[in-house]
Image (spheres, rainbow, N blue to C red):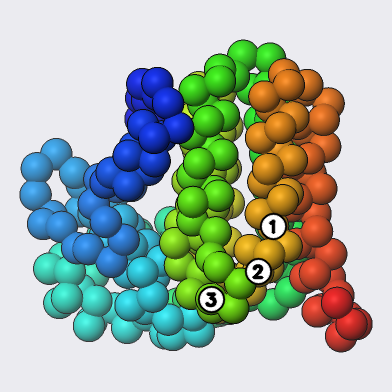
Amino acid sequence: MPTIALDLHSVSTVSTVYRARPPASRSGYAKGEVMSASGAQSLEEYGYQALRNLILGGEIAAGQKLVQEELAQRLGVSRTPLRSAIAALERDGFVVISPRGEATVVTFGPDRIADLFEVRAVLEGLTCRLVAPRIELRHTLYLRSLITSAAPQPGDEDWSAYREADREFHHYLTTLLGNNFLTRQLDAVRDVLRLSLAQGLLRPPAETLQEHIDIIDALEAHDPDKAEQAMLTHIRKTIALMRARADNRPV
């Protein structure tokens, strides 16, 4: 994963950085975009990345069946690498394959989402614990401006900017750690969770903004215990919401 390089001399610089074009995705192209199956990239890898982006971009919806003939024509690949790509998507949690071999994009229930968030909570809590002693003021200034500038005004129901800022917030913390293995594990969990968020399962910014600020405050104080606990509290409140929905309890 590329590390985000910032040279932040002031809060105004931070805002400028945030408005700049975001880093490229792991596949090197934007979600929903299909690139040419050329160069060193294998057809299987190309098929995987292209299908993954179509799913994450919402062009292939949750619960939709993957018709291999149509996809092979759309992506310009044969069915052999396409089948391998679909098998890889199943391993990564994007699709389910029936005993008859039919592949369908996963549909998330509250229990499944809660399980994924629990994995994310532990890994991101550990990330905060390890980052807290070494984080610099320029990093926390960036995080603070990132999340507060994207917060919607009361009554504004467009959360898209805040949702993107939230993704960048959590991803940026991981890149600061510089642990590529942990980054890959968290990116995989977050990618699958993006499918659930696309289905509208997200707490409103009014609930989560202060939680992000609490995380930043703990990091700025270089307090590993508080930083880890703040992140765990933040994510586990979402877990509680998912569990309540699964049990049909009031939230």
- Looking at the rendered structure, the kind of residue marked 1 is Thr
Q: Choose top left, top right, bottom left or bottom right for residue 80.
A: bottom left
Hey, what amino acid is under mark 2?
Pro
Residue occupying image coordinates x 68% and y 14%: 133
Label 2 or label 3, whichever comes before in sequence order: 3
Q: Residue at x 17, y 76 (%)?
A: 74
Question: Dot 1: few (<14), some (14–19), or many (≥20) neighbours within 10 Å?
Answer: some
Q: Residue 72, percent across and down?
A: 20, 73
Q: Secondary structure at mark 3?
A: loop
Q: Is residue 144 left or right of residue 212?
A: left
- The disc placed on residue 50 is none
Work out whether 136 lies above or below 55.
above
Q: Which residue is mark 2?
A: 204
Q: Is residue 174 visible?
A: no
Label 3 vs label 1: CA separation? 15 Å
Q: Which residue is mark 3?
A: 156
CA separation, marks 2 and 3?
11 Å
Tell me which numbered mark, 3 or 1, is placed earlier along the sequence: 3
Q: Judging from the image, what secondary structure is the residue with disc 1 in?
A: helix
Cα–Cα span, label 2 and label 1: 7 Å
Within 10 Å of the Cα at label 2, are there few (<14), some (14-19), or many (20+) other Cα atoms? few
Q: Quadrant of the N terminus?
A: top left
Residue that carries the numbered disc 1 in the rendered image: 208
Which amino acid type is shown beneath numbered disc 3? Asp
Q: Nearer the viewer, residue 177 or 209?
A: 209
Q: Position of residue 190 (x, y in %)?
A: 55, 53
What is the quadrant of the C terminus in the image?
A: bottom right
Q: Position of residue 124 (x, y in %)?
A: 67, 39
Q: Residue at x 72, y 51 (%)?
A: 210
Q: In x, y percent, where is residue 14? A: 41, 34
